[in-house]
Image (spheres, rainbow, N blue to C red):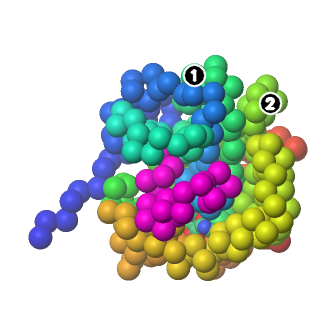
Amino acid sequence: MEVPRRPEIFDFHGVSMINVITDNWDNVQNFKARPDDILIATYPKAGTTWISYILDLLYFENMDPDRQTSIPLHERVAFLEISVPSQPSDKLPTTPRLIKTHLPVQFVPKSFWEQRCRVVYMARNAKDNVVSYFHFYRMNGALPEPGDWSTFLQDFMEGKRVYGSWYDHVNGWWEKKETYSDFHYMFYEDLIEDCGRELDRLCSFLGLSPSPEEKERIRASVTFDSMKQNKMTNYTTAHKLNHEVSPFMRKGKVGDWKNHFTVAQNEQFDEDYKKKMKNPDLKFRCEI
Ligand code: A3P
């Protein structure tokens, strides 16, 4: 059987992209957000699925039990740059619509800002992020060739992986925080460290007040092990993903980068990182 070819990467307005995203560009840019839409924004592999599931449970756990047991999470949360124009969440006329995107901030359709939609951004330290992305590239035939680990790492540092520079992404979204108040910037490492605390912060941003029992139930449902067991959240129902190469729910840890970076790679990475990450307010933890 012929193995389908992986897509080529190319520069699109200064950001590395693939056709499946840019073919849709006008539809994405003309997307009509509603004021109660919630936009979940991340660089790929920063914990998109995790925060999506948390939001889905916060809004819909009590309203629709079937949703939790029979609709995979990736069908409940629309993928902006992939699902449009087939109308995000059209099968699920829910309110609020949960919409995820990996777009850098400058590419987000303007109606999200005009409608004052709430935005939740989740960021993950660059070292664990690139390791996770490497394994995801390996298991996802819809992405370009990963190459070997050292090539992948080098390309990541140069912004040549899909969605471009991690450094520009986390910084661009961080700067948005200064001018757009309906915005909550979260860190993967904080969620690992204390999920309950982060849930409280998120609820306070969203104006939600779940009972202690609900919060505890959600906390238990969103652990790595529960989500890995759960067919609705572990992506085993998605096409093009080969979990034998690497499972989608892979490790879910802070610090796995230490099993991948050589000492020399780490030194080079740190050196380069210092040059690119100049904002003293935006700090990441590579271990906790
Ligand atoms: P690893 O590859 O390091 O295991 P995304 O959803 O943005 O694609 O991110 C996927 C990454 O988030 C994977 O990282 C995955 O294991 C991790 N992840 C997903 N759910 C998680 C959870 N409940 N707890 C910790 N990590 C989680």
- Amino acid at circle 2: Ser
Left or right of 109, for residue 127: right
Does the magenta stretch mainly form a helix, a strand or a loop? helix
Q: Is mark 1 within 8 Å of ligand 1?
A: no
Compute the Cα span from label 1 to label 2: 16 Å
**For residue 36, above or below residue 143:** above
Q: Which part of the image, by quadrant, shows the C terminus?
A: bottom right
> Of the residues under marks 1 and 2, which one precedes in the sequence?
1
Residue 58 shown left or right of residue 204 in the figure:
left
The residue at which mark 2 appears reads as: 181
Please report the residue visible at 68 percent of the width from the left and 38 percent of the height from the top.
Answer: 119
Front-most of residues 18 and 35: 35
Is 16 covered by the magenta stretch?
A: no
Dividing the picture into quadrants, the one containing residue 200 is bottom right
Answer with left or right where residue 156 lies relative to residue 201.
left
Circle 1 SS class: helix
Amino acid at circle 1: Lys
Residue 74 placed where, x, y %? 46, 56
Instruction: Give me the disc on residue 110.
Output: 1
Q: Is residue 47 visible?
A: no
- At which x and y percent is residue 282? 82, 46
Give x and y (percent) for residue 54.
66, 59
Q: Which residues are magenta?
A: 57-78
Q: Residue at x 37, y 67 (%)?
A: 237
Q: Position of residue 67 (x, y in %)?
A: 49, 59
